[in-house]
Amino acid sequence: MQREQISVFDMFKIGIGPSSSHTLGPWRAAQQFVQSLADKGVLADVAEIKILLYGSLAKTGRGHGTDIAVLLGLSGDDPVTFEVDQVGPKTDHIRKSHKLLLGGVKEIAFNAEEDMLFLFAESLPFHPNALSFQAFLNNGTAVSETYYSIGGGFVVKEGVNGQQKTEVDLPFPIDTANNLLHWCMKTGLKISEVVMENELAWRSEQETVTGVMNIFKAMRECIYRGCHTTGYLPGGLNVARRAASLNRRLIGNRVYTNFDEWVEAIRDTGYSFKNILDWVSCFALAVNEENASFGRVVTAPTNGAAGVIPAVLQYFLVFSDGYEDSKIIQFLLTASEIGSIFKKGATISAAMGGCQAEIGVSSAMAAAALTECFGGTQRQCLMAAEIAMEHHLGMTCDPIGGLVQVPCIERNTMGAIKAITASQLALQTNPDNAKVSLDAVVKTMWQTAQDMNSKYKETADGGLAINIPLSLPEC
């Protein structure tokens, strides 16, 4: 596997749903292509654009909003700041007007039905999520570039080294869990402290703290919004949103007007196992219902698995007296390192590894983070991550209708509960007795991914995707 330097802000990216690899990645690829045209000095000379979608991007592209993301990326819009309620209106206007304002500056004729091709039977060898852009210039020449969306919003341009950040001298280079444990044992630092020291190679501590808290703010707003929005998810499955109704039932007649007051109201509902279980499910449902509705979420490490880490973090903040900035930062830094180990040693792309690469990784990330925040040792944190992933091995990605809805949304609730269980098991266990290491489970996950049939890798060609009639309700 390629050696990478991965920051916390690579693992956690603010963007728009429903998919990091099928929405955010293609959006970023389109932006990069427009920037490439500008760098070449030919943006003003473009007369026509063609987009070719291959493999998994073609098969589930419409359900995952790949076409929408590409249109917005080519238009010069950014997923971090673009108003989510304008996603539909703007792309509808492009389709109806047959015009595209390339990079926000160059208007060209564009017919989405003819100029964006879904090549269902073709796949490029490097990665299933491939797309090519072809720009035809006024002088008769053309510029063509191919990009791969490799999971979690990461994008690789064909012919270019995948490492996009400037390489730095990290004080604690880490590729494996064993590397991480080595530095923790040598220095006595917690996992989150090792991560912070590495982040200092890119920016100041205050910049990192501010950035991480912005990530948390986006997660918090997503949970709150999802718990107070009703209706049905877009896409044709007619899946009803459940988080808001569950929130109403659980919260009762308690009154609140903002997030902090809501947290206090949730605490007032009690600390019984059943109540906490319901709330964790509610938090996870809220995030992924927002994700499915083209809402703003955080890749954690992907959009399809965006609900696990916020749900477990919210559980810690609400029910474990962890609502402190320092604990939030500790949680997210620890989680990011576990995610980076999986990305380096295996994959975080469902198109490469099935859902084990998304929900499984997010559950492992959350388990380790929760364990550290509860005072677990570094080895217990790694053990928690291993337990969480061990019980996601082999999980397929079989989205019904090619949408990030069924079974994706509920899988986030399962991943969150497994993370909490894995953490509790690790905290009550002597890691000296562990039979399976985190590195062993990462290796196993990658081997499983390679052996998995492609129809179970985000193609909607197998599993639930072909056994559930689209006219049926979710449950």
Image: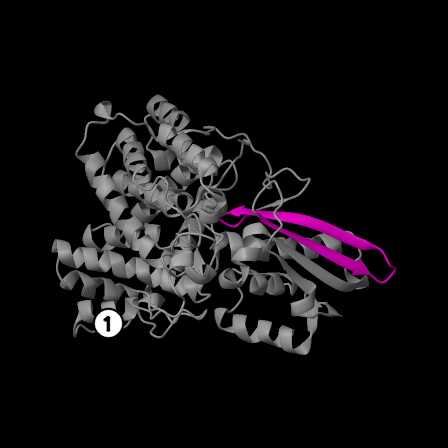
Q: Residue furthest right?
A: 139
Instruction: Locate residue 99, reporting x and y percent.
Output: 70, 73
Residue sitting at x 25%, y 26%:
434
Residue 75 placed where, x, y %? 65, 65
Choose top left, top right, bottom left or bottom right for residue 120: bottom right
Residue 150 against residue 448 in the figure, above or below: below
Q: Position of residue 400 (x, y in %)?
A: 42, 60
Residue for point 32% across, 26% down: 188
User: In the image shown, does 258 or 158 lie closer to the viewer?
Assistant: 158
Residue at the spot x=61%, y=76% of the render? 93
Q: Amino acid at mark 1?
A: Tyr
What secondary structure is found at the residue carrying circle 1?
Answer: loop
Q: Which residues are magenta?
A: 129-154
Q: Is residue 113 above or below residue 423?
A: below
For residue 250, say whether it is visible.
yes
Which residue corresponds to mark 1?
A: 256
Direction from residue 203 to residue 273 in the image, left or right: left
**Disc 1 crowd, CA 10 A, few/some/many (<14, 14-19, 20+):** few
Q: Is residue 299 magenta?
A: no
- Where residue 15 sits: x, y (%)? 49, 58
Residue plotted at (47% across, 36% down)? 450
Majority secondary structure of magenta residues: strand
Nearer to us in this view, 364 or 259: 364
Task: Check the image and report above or below for 365 versus 96.
Answer: above
Q: Is residue 358 left or right of residue 170?
A: left
Is 291 on the left or on the right of 317, as rendered? right
* Residue 147: in magenta span: yes
